[in-house]
Image (cartoon, rainbow, N blue to C red):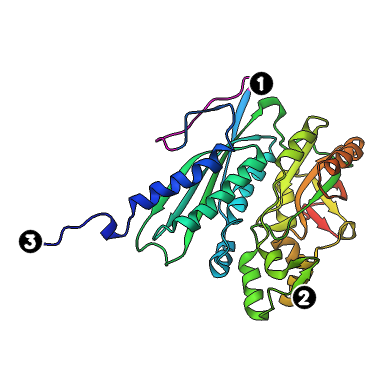
Amino acid sequence: MSEQLSYRDAGVDIDAGDQLVENIKPFAKRTMRPEVLGDLGGFGAIVEISKKYRNPVLVSGTDGVGTKLRLAFEWDQHDTVGIDLVAMSVNDILVQGAEPLFFLDYFACGKLDVARATDVIRGIAAGCEASGCALIGGETAEMPGMYPVGEYDLAGFAVGVAEKDALITGKTITAGDVILGLASNGAHSNGYSLIRKIIERDQPNLDTPFDGDKTLREAVIAPTRLYVKPILSLMQKITVKGMAHITGGGLSENIPRVLPENTVAAIQAASWTMPKLFQWLQQAGNVATQEMYRTFNCGIGMVLIVDKNDADTAIAHLREQGETVYTLGVIRPRQGQEHQTCIE
């Protein structure tokens, strides 16, 4: 008679999965909103739409953390990549004027390390709490043989709600509008394949003082900034015509996504100082300036486009909310088929 086998013998530990759910319940509970019906752990999560919306539409987004995860594995630092995961989705749906309503995560690994997974999901819950977004559930997939020991993958899914007639589409953007930039926390979650290559080639000391009280390691791994609450509050004061979350493609490729075809974002490079992290990346990697602009956020994590008459109000309000704000330039007419982002 052959040996009796269990699921654990095949590499899947149901008890570990149950323990993870218990570990994360307190974090998830802090993110709850009145619209959430039911508790964490069911087969599906139920959320109603607040009665404050007259004609609501749902806005959804999904993303991951990319190769920044490789640094999390190599440096054994897992407490902030969950914030990155949330930010990449909630900042995306924010640009269309949506208030993030709920978030779901997908955590996949070969063998579940409960402590490590708890660190990751604690970060996810922190990102949701900072965004006013409920963490209503997710999926933890333990799949033996699919991932190397100690590694995992992450995906996130955010759903938000907005008034249909208040969606931000960029269609009203015209020449003369002002372009504002909100400072980033660092590279956020983009360009890490190049960052890793530069670190590998340059072999810097990651743990000496680098930028103020930060080491280079801390500057590189810093989580994506969450812009939700300051911008939602700004939208109660003025009309924001367009927004761009500066992710993959950097400044050059993201801003045109919200511009009418006959316009150009004319940005003055001198309007902000590229943070030390990006200065180091450019120098150590011998990266051309325009390549920097199309790969990294270069210190600008979110771009807002507002009427020139609203610019001063927007700047003052965002600064009151703790944001660092730069006046990057203006919208001008497009000449022929020129690129819609011009940084000079």
Residue under the point 92% across and 35% down:
309
Position of 117 with respect to 168 (left or right) is left
Q: Name the dominant secondary structure of the magenta segment.
A: loop
Q: Residue at x 67, y 45 (%)?
A: 91
- Crowd rating for badge 2 (residues with CA inside 10 Å; few <14, some 14–19, many 20+): few
Q: Which residue is at the far left?
A: 1
Q: With 92 as the anchor, is 141 left or right in this view?
A: left
Which kind of residue does numbered mark 2 sit on?
Answer: Gln
Count neighbours of disc 1 (C-alpha within 10 A) and say few if under 14, some if 14 to 19, many if 20 or more: few
| Amino acid on which disc 3 is placed | Met
* Residue 311 placement (x, y as % from top left): 89, 40
Is 155 positioned to the left or the right of 330 in the image? left
Residue position marked by numbered label 3 in the rendering: 1
Instruction: Give the image location of residue 193, x and y in percent.
Output: 61, 67
Range of the magenta residues? 41-55
Structural distance between the alpha carbons of marks 3 and 1:
66 Å
Gap between marks 2 and 1, in whole Å?
51 Å
Identify the mark nearer the N-term, 3 or 1: 3
Kindly indicate whether the residue at mark 1 contacts the one at mark 3 (C-beta within 8 angstroms). no
- Considering the numbered disc 1 on the image, is that residue within a helix, a strand or a loop? loop
Q: Position of residue 28 (x, y in %)?
A: 54, 40
Q: Which residue is mark 2?
A: 283
SS of the residue under disc 3: loop
